[in-house]
Every structure is written in structure tokens, then in C-alpha cells.
Image (spheres, rainbow, N blue to C red):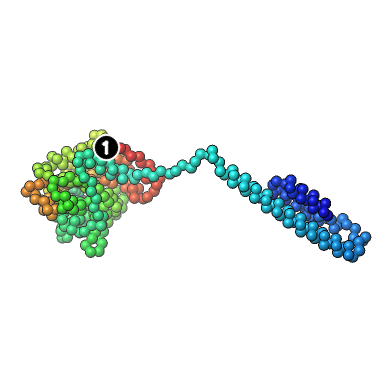
Amino acid sequence: MQDLMEQLSQDLHAATTADQVEQIRIAYLGRKGTITTLAKNTDFSTLSPEEKKEFGQKLNDLKNRATTEINKAMESAKRSLLTKRKTREIDLTAPGNDRRLGTLHPITMTQMEIEDIFEGMGFSVLAGPEVESEYFCFEALNIPSDHPARDMQDTFWLKNNLVLRTHTSANQVRTLKRFGAPVRAIFPGRCFRYEAVDPSHENTFYQCEGLVVDENISVANLIAVMKTILSEVFRRDVKVRLRPGFFPFVEPGFELDLNCLLCGGKGCPTCGDGWIELIPCGLIHPEVLRHGGIDPEKYSGFAFGIGLTRLAMMKYGIRDIRYLNAGDLRFNEQFLPIF
Ligand code: PHE
């Protein structure tokens, strides 16, 4: 029996895989294994009761020791397989994982570009609150609470006479109060309206408002600045049209429409009739200047509200406004800056 144990140790030592250890287990402890059949092959008739007892004990002992040895060998075979696998995982020559780079949202890129162009013309870039007072959003802009123009903008009302600003024009009087005249500034930002959402209407959208106040500012200055902006943004000739537009805070007021770049002016779901209302604008109403603490006898100015969301759609050929707020990276990542 001692020989058998030594033989087993040698066999196990030579085994390198779990499979080989299993084969050895079968050879020794399996149904026809050497140890299992030891009792069968022994002639008990020649043994005394004491010798039989001793044999039984030795056999049990042998089985136990063999089982322990085999289990140990099995464990270490499995462990060395794991180590091998782990070593293989660290392959210093393997190419690295790509790091995902973020991209800018098409509206952000459009906004940055507009800011650059205006800064080049001496404008400051300002920001104002999205939660705005009724005063700056409406009253200071000649839109008292009983004015029908309030119906033009479906408003999200908050408590304490606060609203989610319906337009960036809310910054006009803030800017005038703060900087006085002369002043040149733009204030891009997010606006909110209680709109039924469709391919060209969203409840959350971006505008880029701007104003110039100085002595002798006229409609000619307004048109010149608007033309410069659009030709810089689109880097090509664009067709625009100016038609009268009503806004209580400008006089005269205009709608500057852009010939749709998606359909070439033929008419499509985005523009409707071939024209996109892009830049409402006009000369600042004397009453608004007064709210801003500015003497309308001395100063005049123009204001405009570029539809930043619409501009981004035109620039990048986006046909449905709803993609812009959907937060789908597959959409957001497609756009490269056109600087
Ligand atoms: N605030 C107006 C709107 O959102 C647009 C506008 C801005 C009109 C500036 C005239 C001057 O509809």
C-alpha cells in the first residue's frame, strides 16, 4: 500500500492539467481503480480477524490520503490555468481602447460662431436669467398684462410674477439699465414657450438677441449688420426678405426672412412656404429706452432676435427641431464645427 501511495504521488506530480488529474483519480479511485479493487483482489480467507481489521483500516486510510492528494492536485491545476489566462490578458502589445471624445451640440457650435462674428464687430456677449420677472419679459417691453401681444407668446407662469422667459428680449432693458448708452451687445440663450411640439416648434429653444444704442442709429445700420451676419454665417449668398412685423417694443418692426436652404425656397415641412422667419427686428421703441433709463431724444437704437435654433437647423440641414433636445448621442455627434 505504501508503494501505491508513492506511485500516486509520482503520477500526480507529472500531471499538469485538471484533465490529467481527473484521469489519475479514475485510475486509482474510480469503480475499477487500483485502490477500489484492492479489497476485491485480496484473499481474506487466509487472514485472521485481527489482520482483516488492520487491512480494512489501512485501506480506509489509503483511500482518504489518496483523495486528499488528488483534490490538492486538482486545485493547483485549476489555479495554474487561471494564472495562465490572467497572464495572457495583460498583453502589452495589444492596441489600447479608444477614449470617447465629446462633441459640441450643433446649437452650441452655432452660438459660438455667432458670438465670434459679433465680437469681431465690437459687441459684448452677455447672459441673463432664464427665470425672469414679468416686468423684464413683458411690461418693460411695452406689453402690459391686458395687451393682446401677450397672446403671441404662450407662457410658462411660475409663482410670484416670475415666468420662464419667452424670449431673450427680456434682456434688453436689463442691458440698457446696466450699461447705459452707447452700447452694443448680444445675449444668446434658452427660451421657453408652452407650444404644441411639431417639426418646427419646440417648448425649449434658443435665440440670440442683440441691440445697438447710440446717436443717429437708423434702419440702414440694422440692415447692414444683419446682412453682414448672415453672409458670415452661411459663407455664401443667401436670399432674405424684409417685411413689416409687429412687436410692441420696436417701431418700426420687421421680419427678416431667410429663403429656406433645405428646399431652396420651394416649400417643405420645415419652412412651409419657402421662407423661414429668422430675424425679427426693428428700431427700439422710445418707451423701452425710457424703461432702460435712456433719453430717446438723444439716442436711438435697433434690436433683433435671431432664432438660434432655426439658424442651426438651416446651417446643418436638420429637418426636425425635435432632434435637438432629444439627447440622442447618435444625432448629436454627427456635427463638426464649421469654423
Ligand atoms: N422677442 C421677439 C420674439 O421672440 C423677437 C424680436 C426681438 C423682435 C427683437 C424684435 C426685436 O418673438
Q: Quadrant of the N terminus?
A: bottom right
| Residue located farthest toward the left when viewing the structure as drawn | 297
The image quarter in which residue 192 lies: bottom left
Q: Is residue 173 left or right of residue 267?
A: left
Residue position marked by numbered label 1 in the rendering: 234
Of helix, strand and loop, which one carries label 1? helix
Say which residue appears at 34% left-offset and 45% top-offset: 105
Q: Label 1 amino acid?
A: Phe
Q: Quadrant of the C terminus?
A: top left
The image quarter in which residue 235 lies: top left
The image quarter in which residue 318 lies: top left
Name the one closer to the observer, 77 or 164: 77
Residue 156 coordinates in the image, percent (x, y): 26, 59
Say which residue appears at 26% left-offset and 55% top-offset: 130
User: Is the shortest distance between ligand 1 and the CB of mark 1 under 8 Å?
Assistant: no
Q: Residues within 10 Å of mark 1 (few under 14, many from 20)?
A: some
| Residue located farthest toward the bottom when viewing the structure as drawn | 49
Residue 161 coordinates in the image, percent (x, y): 21, 62
Can residue 244 be seen by looking at this rendering? no
| Residue located farthest toward the right when viewing the structure as drawn | 46
Quick check: 88 above or below 194? above
Say which residue appears at 11% left-offset and 43% top-offset: 217
Can residue 234 be seen by looking at this rendering? yes
Q: Is residue 120 left or right of residue 66?
A: left
Residue 76 coordinates in the image, percent (x, y): 67, 51
Report how many numbered discs are placed on residues in the image.
1
Name the one closer to the observer, 258 or 11: 11
Residue 89 coordinates in the image, percent (x, y): 57, 44
Say which residue appears at 88% left-offset and 57% top-offset: 42
